[in-house]
Amino acid sequence: MLASSLVFLALAFCLTVAQNLSIPSTWRDPTTSLSLSERVSIAQNCIDTLTGVLNTSTGSFSGLGYWQDANVISAMANLDYFTFSRTNQQAVTDSLNATFSLYTDYDQYGCYNDDAMWWATAAYYGYRAYGDINLLSHAIETWQHVSNYVITASDASSGKQPNKDFLIEGSCEGETMVGGVFWRPTSDDTSVNSITTGLYVALSAYLASATGNITYNNAAILSANFIKTTNMNSGGLVLDSIDAQDCTRSPSDWLFTYNSGKYIEGLSVLASVTGNSSWTSLLVDIVAVATKATAWEGSNGIITEGADITEDNDGVGFKAVLMRGLAEAWSRNIGNTTLRTLIQSYIDVQFNALLDLASTSDSGSMWYSPAWEGPGPTSFIAWGQLAAVDVLVSAVRINS
Ligand SMILES: *[C@@H]1O[C@H](CO)[C@@H](O)[C@H](O)[C@H]1NC(C)=O
Ligand SMILES: *[C@@H]1O[C@H](CO)[C@@H](O)[C@H](O)[C@H]1NC(C)=O
Ligand SMILES: *[C@@H]1O[C@H](CO)[C@@H](O)[C@H](O)[C@H]1NC(C)=O
Ligand SMILES: *[C@@H]1O[C@H](CO)[C@@H](O)[C@H](O)[C@H]1NC(C)=O
Ligand SMILES: *[C@@H]1O[C@H](CO)[C@@H](O)[C@H](O)[C@H]1NC(C)=O
Ligand SMILES: *[C@@H]1O[C@H](CO)[C@@H](O)[C@H](O)[C@H]1NC(C)=O
């Protein structure tokens, strides 16, 4: 009785927050007057600064980490996809090929499922942009590998996951663990996290759309359901991680842009491939709160997360993932003008902040700071370019 009243209150709260798709009047400059060709050249200029530090025989960008490398490759493929171009095809394909042959299933150290999934997703974007079936097969092989670390219904009921050497909880606080994906393949690592699961939702849904194979639909639905029921807070944002052995959660203030962003992307694709509008309602709810989350922005709307200018770290790469997820939601919800205007405004706030406050022009190239409120950097910062590139590529898409 008590439990169900609490659930009811949580849902009611979610719905109240979720309905509001209006644009706060306090947001800084939510529109752009730049033409399509100007925006394309701004995005490609940023990509060119990064390919300047790319070694295509290892797929690595000097100054970035392994998962971040995959995110630059993703943005490069997506710009070509959005503009029907092949400008970046050679660098994208060479890097994906090199990385796949260097590291089995794209897992560089043999110990991070999310690393493997970032690269497999980049391979999928490459396939989407260029129709290269070889890249699709990289994505599928990696998906099959990571599928060994998903909690199935029978794992949950037996309390045993075949690739883990400890007993697991089938549910936590009364909510199912089925569909959760382990962060690491290591047999004694107990963490199930939203980014690995969200990547798995999105890639499964993309593979469903590419192949029509129902296995991917079912996988996407199961894992999307896990995040929905078990790893979101009452305000409608995606939480970070949960321990499958003892149900311990990450701190409630571990609210990161990429967890909600990757889930928004996955739900957008899942809604299209299933035609089930309950996923659309959920993604609209999350977009409404993620674009206004005080956890990562002030009243001007500019994202302040991951603003470290002194050294690269994982956090500086998160906000780009939210931008990419929002752009996918924009692309797949053509009927919902209110939703699309909110997404467009939010991305343009970041776009204008980068151009007006956080950039420095250097003989034809633009350098971007990872601190989007500025000032512009005094030298090239590779991770500043990484953080910016998805904003610039998304601004091509959502203003067209
Ligand atoms: C909806 O959001 C707008 C902009 O942030 C705000 O001004 C308005 O009060 C909100 N409306 C409701 C019903 O909360
Ligand atoms: C690229 O990486 C390969 C393999 O590690 C290395 O042999 C080569 O020297 C690198 N190229 C550049 C330009 O750094
Ligand atoms: C990538 O690798 C595949 C398989 O080895 C090969 O068929 C393809 O030609 C390669 N693509 C490029 C652009 O090198
Ligand atoms: C569907 O996808 C699964 C997972 O990759 C694979 O095992 C199966 O062979 C595929 N089925 C068909 C008919 O291609
Ligand atoms: C749509 O998805 C929801 C949420 O998972 C589910 O409860 C419902 O049964 C689905 N509807 C159909 C027609 O499959
Ligand atoms: C757009 O999303 C909002 C919020 O969920 C919803 O109220 C509205 O009906 C949607 N509009 C369309 C045309 O789908």
Image (tube, rainbow, N blue to C red):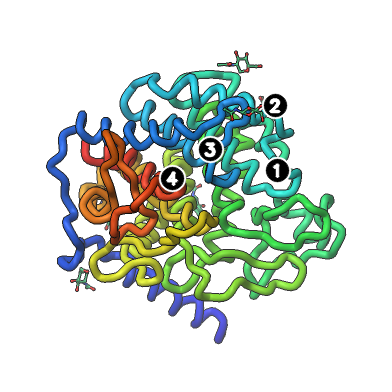
In this view, the mark in front (2 or 1): 2
Q: Residue furthest bottom?
A: 2
Q: Are marks 4 and 3 in contact (CB under 8 Å)?
A: yes
Q: Residues within 10 Å of mark 4 (few under 14, many from 20)?
A: many
Q: What residue sits right under mark 2 in the picture?
A: 101
Three-letter code, disc 1: Ser
Mark 3 and mark 2 lie on one chain; the one further toward the N terminus is: 3
Q: What residue sits right under mark 4 in the picture?
A: 386
In this view, the mark in front (3 or 1): 3
Give me the disc on residue 113. none
Mark 4 and mark 3 lie on one chain; the one further toward the N terminus is: 3
Three-letter code, disc 2: Ser
Q: Quadrant of residue 399?
A: top left
Q: What residue sits right under mark 3 in the picture?
A: 61
Q: Can residue 186 be seen in this snapshot?
A: yes
Residue in the image at 54% along x and 56% along y? 314
Mark 3 and mark 1 lie on one chain; the one further toward the N terminus is: 3
User: What's the CA distance linking mark 2 and mark 1?
Assistant: 20 Å
Whether the residue carrying mark 2 lies under 8 Å from ligand 3 is answered with: yes
| 191 or 270: nearer the viewer | 191
